[in-house]
Each structure stands twice: as C-alpha cells, then as structure tokens.
C-alpha cells in the first residue's frame, strides 16, 4: 500500500506540475478610441512641459511600472477601422483588402484574425464595446456580436455626457462615475461567469468615450483639470489659446475615465487571483480627434500611441525604446497563447522583448515603423477619392510620401463660413476627415488672421509630394526639409527604404499606379453592401 501510495503521490505531483506548465495565460486588451500617447507615466519619462503634465492615469502607470512601457509605439494607420484591421490580422492594413479603409470597409473572413484563432485553440473570448467598426459585418474579426458582453450597460461610451446628465439630476460626480464603473465591472463578471473552469480567456475592452464628442469643459468639471496649466506647453501646430487648451483638458478627462475603468478590471483580476497570469495590454487606435496633426495624419501626433504591458512572463520595471507597430500585437497574443502565428502576418511578436531583462533598445532591428492612410470618412475632393499616404519613422527622421498631392488632406473645404456651432458639432460641414471640435471651429474661424493662418495651413492646406522632418531639431514636425539640399541624401535613402518595404509587402498603392485604391468600392460613392454614414444636417454626429 505504501509503495502504491508513493507512486500515486508521485504521479499526482507530476500531473500537477504538467498542468501548471500547460496553463496558458489570459489576455486582457484595453484599447481606447483616439487615445494617443497620453498617460502620467509619460510625463515622468519625457519631463515637464508637455501635454502629459496635467493628466493622471494611476492604473496605466501601474501597468507600466510593474511591466514594460514602450516609448515608440505607433499605429499602422491613424484611422480606426484600418488600424484595427491591421491589429487584428497582424498585417499591414493595405494587405487586408476592403478592410484597409474606413467608410466602405468590409471584412474578408479568409484573413486570419488572432481572436478567432485563440478561440479555436480553446480560449474563451469576449469583448466589451467597439472592436472593428465602422465596417461590415461589425466586429467581424471578433466573431461579430457572438462574444459581446454589454448587457449591464454601454453608458461609459458617452462618459462625460452621462455623468453630466446624472449630476444635473442630483447625483454627486463620484456617485455618477461609480454607476458607470459598475456597469463595466458587471459586464466583465458576466464574461467570467461564462468561462469554463480553468479555461484561459482573451478579453477586449474597447470603450469609445475618448472619441468625440465629449461635453465641453468636462475636463475641469468632472476631473478638476485646469486648462490654463497647459499654457506654454502646446505643440507648435496647435494654437495656444483658451479654446484649444479647454478642448485638450476635456479630452484628457475622457482618457482619465478610461484609466479608471482599467482599474475596475485590474481589481477583478486580483480578486480572482489571475492578475499575474494575465497579459494586460493598454493602447489606443491613433492620435487625438479634432486637432491638427492628430487623427488621420502620419505625424507623430496622429500615429504615436500609449503602449504598456504587464504580466504573463513579462519582465517588469523597464522602459523600452524599440519601435513597435501595433500589428505586432496579433502575433504576440498568439505566441502568448501557445500558437504559431500564421506566416501571412507581417507583424513580429513582442514576446522576446517582453521577457527580456534589458531596457532601452532591446531588439536592434526594431528601429523603424511604417504607417499609412487611404480613405477615411470622405477623404478628398473629386468624388470621394482617398488621400493616400505612406510614411517611414526612424529615431531621427519622419519621411512622408503623399501620392496625390493635388488632393486635400482633410477633404473638401465645404462650408467654411458656417457658424461656429455647426463647425463644432457636424464633421461633414467642412474638411470631414478632421472630426468636428471647438479647436477645428476656432482655427477655421481665424483663417484670415495672419497670426493664425499658418495653423490653418498646417491643418488643412495641400501638402507637397514629399515631407521630411528632423526629429532632434523639429520634434513637432512643422519644418519640412525635403527640398533642402543638406538633406537630399537622407530623403532619397528614406524614400528607397520605404518603397522597398511597400513593394516587399505587396502594397497595392505602389502597383498599377494605385488602381486598387482608386476604383470602386475603395473610392467613389459607398457601395450598397455597407451601411451609409449618417449625414447630420445640424448639431450631432455619429462616431467614426
């Protein structure tokens, strides 16, 4: 009996060890619309005097301090649908067919998507709020709505609007906020309840509150952010005036709401005893909406985003300089889950970087990113043609190639003489590829003022075929040296390097004069097989 017990005990111990080794990590991906590179941890990294001076994000900071903070993470495309197409497929956005655009996007189910691959391998997958839209079918690469956990409520997607409304009805600010946090927690609880015992999970938290529109002045009213603390700290392409500073403060308030909801999810994981076995990743799908150089632009303000990663074997306490394209996340998630990424993926897994003990430049080959853009909402004149761009960003330079410089980068000027309220509320009034905002309305209203004309031009004017910026001398990327003889060699080398990668990855934009992107359904009127955007006649708009 003792001998049998000994062998039985040994078998049980070995079985337990094997089970522990085989337990696959969970994945929690927190991905905010339009978030940009904003978190208080970046203020500690970059120093004072930047836009991060007034924002407070304790939960993102915790993830970064206990994990890895990336200094140089960029989206593949600064437009939500193509950015997400790239992220979900692990490929450059131009390799995803009709998913490479925003209006008119349609998902090709033959393209591998990491959530469905994880599901097929035994993961319990779920999502809260936005994953892949606008596009048809909505959230297709995440199984459409089959894995949605949102019954407790979706009000966090209009955070400042709903909190402001509840406060007007008599609730305290903190009580109103908590009501929305509780909805987030309840949705996540429902997801966990549906999980089988010890089943690994992959969950996407994708709120849209950081997207326009939010309540004007809500940064100060709900988060005690003083816009005047931003005075003297705005990048050169933003007018340093009260209207713009207030707009930014309200934007940062929405990011703080996103951070607070991340805190709700972290507490849930801690209570379950699953935090350390969960790869927690926080990022956003491009830069700030309704501001020059932001969303829909290949400048850093449009493509540079937050990226913090914690848990599941990540060696923490590090800041990494490696350049990361968010398409790298799909193979990272798959490798974390024990899968081999499909060979079609052009992204490269970050697992080795996450499990390294080095800071600074970990992988010497990660010294650049390539970004691009095609059709957003309306794009350019001439029958809704795209505004095609590709860019190469290295530690020292940003090179942008504008394939059709005769077109308008933010779309048709439209009704420039519309009243300020209409310009603030209705994106389609003018320059539809920049979201409506108080900042946009102010710049358009001051376009004849010589003091601010350059800001109008930075935002809306035609651009040359080639742009080159020297990051060390021009961190805000406003001085184009593409035609400067001193930088001719650099320009030519950057162009050659960019075109080489576009050709290697079979970008349709550099084949047949871009015919794929210049003809229907990639250009022109929207096809019948996708939902048409709502054209608001007055205040209000649909989030894109």
Image: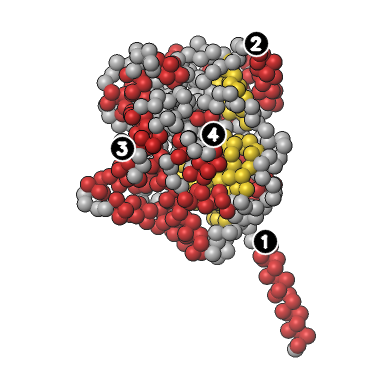
The answer to which of marks 2 and 4 sits earlier in the sequence is 4
Q: CA distance from mark 4 to mark 1?
A: 36 Å
Q: Are marks 2 and 4 in contact (CB under 8 Å)?
A: no
Which quadrant of the figure contains the C terminus? top left
Q: Secondary structure at mark 3?
A: loop
Q: Earlier in the sequence, mark 3 or mark 2?
A: 3
C-alpha gap between disc 3 and disc 2: 47 Å
| 81 relative position to 514: left or right | left
Please identify, in this view, whether the residue under mark 4 or under mark 1 is nearer the observer: 4
Residue 204 at least partly seen: no
Q: Earlier in the sequence, mark 4 or mark 1?
A: 1
Which residue carries the number 1 mark?
22
Circles 4 and 3, Cβ within 8 Å, touching? The answer is no
Residue 207 image point, x, y percent: 43, 44
* Helix, strand or loop for disc 1: helix
Q: Which residue is mark 4?
A: 304
> In front of the other: label 1 or label 3?
3
| Mark nearer the N terminus (1 vs 3) | 1
Q: Residue at x 48, y 43 (%)?
A: 39
Task: Looking at the image, tell me whether mark 1 or mark 2 is earlier in sequence order.
Answer: 1
- What's the CA distance linking mark 1 and mark 2? 59 Å
Q: Which mark is residue 485?
A: 2
Name the spot of residue 59 as percent of width and height, x first: 48, 51
Tell me the number on the disc at residue 217.
3
Horizontal and vertical percent for residue 62?
52, 52
Mark 2 element type: helix
**Dot 3 crowding, Cα within 10 Å, few <14, some 14–19, many 20+:** many
| Residue nearer the viewer, 429 or 48 | 48
Q: Is the Cβ of the residue at disc 3 closer than 8 Å to that at disc 2?
A: no
């Amino acid at each position: 009996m003792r001998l049998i017990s000994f062998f039985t005990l040994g078998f049980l111990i070995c079985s337990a060890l094997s089970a522990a080794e085989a337990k696959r990590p969970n994945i929690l991906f927190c991905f905010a619309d339009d978030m940009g590179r904003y978190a208080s941890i970046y203020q500690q990294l970059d120093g004072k005097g930047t836009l991060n001076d007034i924002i407070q994000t304790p939960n993102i900071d915790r993830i970064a301090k206990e994990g890895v903070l990336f200094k140089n993470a960029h989206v593949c495309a600064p437009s939500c649908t193509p950015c997400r197409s790239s992220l979900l497929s692990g490929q450059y956005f131009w390799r995803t067919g009709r998913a490479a655009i925003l209006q008119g996007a349609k998902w090709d189910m033959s393209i591998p998507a990491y959530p469905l691959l994880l599901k097929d391998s035994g993961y319990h997958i779920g999502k809260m709020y936005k994953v892949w839209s606008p596009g048809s079918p909505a959230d297709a690469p995440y199984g459409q709505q089959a894995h949605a956990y949102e019954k407790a409520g979706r009000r966090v997607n209009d955070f400042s609007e709903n909190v402001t409304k509840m406060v007007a009805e008599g609730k305290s600010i903190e009580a109103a906020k908590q009501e929305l946090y509780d909805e987030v927690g309840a949705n996540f609880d429902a997801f966990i309840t549906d999980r089988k015992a010890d089943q690994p999970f992959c969950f996407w938290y994708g709120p849209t509150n950081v997207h326009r529109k939010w309540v004007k002045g809500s940064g100060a009213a709900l988060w005690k952010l003083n816009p005047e603390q931003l005075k003297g700290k705005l990048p050169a392409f933003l007018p340093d005036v009260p209207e713009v500073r207030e707009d930014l403060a309200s934007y940062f308030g929405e990011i703080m709401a996103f951070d607070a909801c991340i805190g709700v999810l972290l507490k849930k994981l801690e209570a379950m005893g699953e935090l350390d076995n969960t790869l927690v990743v926080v990022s956003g799908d491009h830069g700030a909406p309704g501001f020059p150089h932001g969303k829909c632009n290949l400048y850093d303000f449009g493509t540079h985003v937050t990226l913090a990663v914690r848990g599941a074997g990540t060696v923490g306490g590090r800041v990494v300089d490696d350049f990361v394209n968010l398409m790298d996340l799909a193979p990272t998630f798959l490798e974390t889950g024990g899968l081999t990424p499909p060979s079609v993926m052009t992204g490269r897994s970050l697992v080795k970087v996450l499990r390294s003990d080095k800071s600074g430049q970990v992988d010497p080959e990660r010294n650049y990113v390539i970004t691009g853009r095609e059709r957003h909402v309306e794009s350019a004149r001439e029958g809704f043609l795209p505004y095609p761009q590709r860019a190469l960003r290295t530690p020292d330079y940003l090179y942008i190639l504008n394939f059709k410089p005769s077109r308008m980068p933010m779309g048709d000027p439209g009704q420039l003489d519309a009243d300020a309220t209409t310009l603030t509320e209705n994106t389609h009034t003018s320059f539809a590829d920049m979201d409506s905002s108080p900042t946009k309305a102010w710049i358009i209203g001051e376009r004849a003022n010589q003091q601010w004309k350059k800001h109008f031009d930075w935002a809306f004017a035609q651009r040359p075929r080639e742009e080159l910026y020297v990051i060390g001398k021009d961190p805000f990327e406003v001085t184009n040296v593409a035609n400067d003889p001193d930088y001719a060699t650099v320009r030519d080398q950057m162009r050659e390097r960019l075109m080489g990668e576009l050709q290697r990855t079979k970008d349709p934009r550099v084949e047949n004069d871009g015919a794929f992107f210049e003809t229907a359904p990639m250009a022109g009127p929207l096809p019948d097989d996708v939902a048409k955007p709502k054209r608001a006649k007055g205040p209000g708009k649909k989030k894109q």
